[in-house]
């Protein structure tokens, strides 16, 4: 995977909707692959009382995220791993909450199929997983955006797309 996802943050006002769509429960393990400035990780830990892990390669974002987590007093339930998400085990994940392109989601699909346990929920903003049929799709209009955008939910094992 030579293509690198740019850092484009998820609009903050739709993150609770994403986490609610995934039915995140206290103490569940929530991962954001490509966690950017940790906004999803922080919402998951602070507002949903999950154990949240962000995986991010950009060192500047990792440093800023860790500092924010410390300042918010969330270090006991939120952490950022400075690694390539292709190399991180997903075997203990309960929920994946991400903002990744369909290109990257397509490359990650064999890893999802191999490592994610039955019942794991995946929510992604704006882009579907091409090979899988979404369990649910909802439309949101983030604050300041003009048009509706989709949030896709998948429950493992996913149904193949037609
Ligand atoms: C579209 S942004 C989403 C950021 C954050 N999840 C959010 O929703 O606000 C994608 C992020 O993935 C990170 N990224 C790209 N490729 C990566 C990789 N292979 N491993 C870890 N992080 C990666 C980028 O640095 C960027 O911060």
Image (spheres, rainbow, N blue to C red):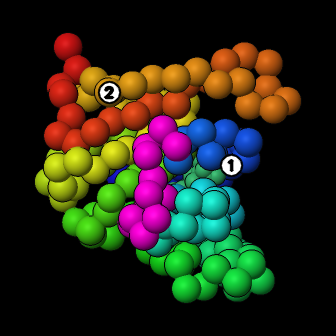
Residue 119 image position (x, y, % from top left): 23, 48
Residue 11 image position (x, y, % from top left): 72, 42
Is residue 11 shown in magenta? no
Displayed quadrant of residue 66: bottom right
- Image height check: is 74 above or below 160? below
Displayed quadrant of residue 161: top left
- Image height check: is 21 above or below 93? above
Which mark is in front, 2 or 1?
Answer: 2
Label 2, label 1: how far apart the Cα atoms are? 24 Å
Question: Residue at (18%, 28%) from the top-left corner?
Answer: 159
Q: Is residue 40 left or right of residue 72?
A: left
Residue 21 image position (x, y, % from top left): 48, 38
Q: Are marks 2 and 1 in contact (CB under 8 Å)?
A: no
Label 2 crowd bin: few (<14), some (14–19), many (20+), radius 10 Å:
some
Instruction: Identify the residue under disc 2.
Output: 135
130 or 141: nearer the eye? 141
Displayed quadrant of residue 143: top right
Q: Is residue 122 left or right of residue 15?
A: left
Q: Is residue 128 left or right of residue 68?
A: left
Q: Which mark is residue 149?
A: none
Q: Quadrant of ligand 1?
A: bottom right
Question: Residue at (48%, 59%) from the top-left corner?
Answer: 32
Asked if residue 27 shows in the view, the reply is yes
Which range of residues does the magenta coloring cover? 20-32
Instruction: Identify the residue under disc 1.
Output: 9
Question: Residue at (60%, 85%) from the top-left corner?
Answer: 75
In the rendered image, the quadrant that contains the C terminus is top left
32 or 118: nearer the eye? 118
Question: Residue at (64%, 80%) from the top-left corner?
Answer: 74
Q: Is residue 145 left or right of residue 37?
A: right
């Amino acid at each position: 995977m030579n293509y690198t996802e740019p850092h484009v943050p998820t609009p903050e006002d739709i993150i609770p909707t994403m986490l609610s769509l995934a039915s995140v429960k206290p103490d569940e393990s929530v991962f954001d692959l490509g966690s950017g400035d940790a906004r999803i990780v922080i919402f998951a830990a602070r507002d949903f009382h999950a154990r949240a892990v962000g995986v991010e390669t950009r060192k500047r974002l990792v440093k800023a995220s860790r500092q924010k987590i410390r300042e918010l007093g969330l270090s006991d339930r939120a952490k950022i791993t400075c690694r390539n998400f292709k190399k991180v085990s997903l075997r203990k994940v309960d929920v994946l909450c991400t903002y990744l392109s369909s290109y990257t989601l397509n490359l990650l699909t064999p890893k999802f199929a191999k490592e994610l346990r039955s019942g794991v929920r995946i929510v992604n903003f704006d882009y579907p997983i091409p090979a899988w049929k979404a369990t649910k799709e909802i439309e949101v209009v983030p604050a300041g955006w003009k048009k509706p955008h989709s949030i896709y939910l998948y429950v493992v094992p996913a149904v193949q797309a037609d």
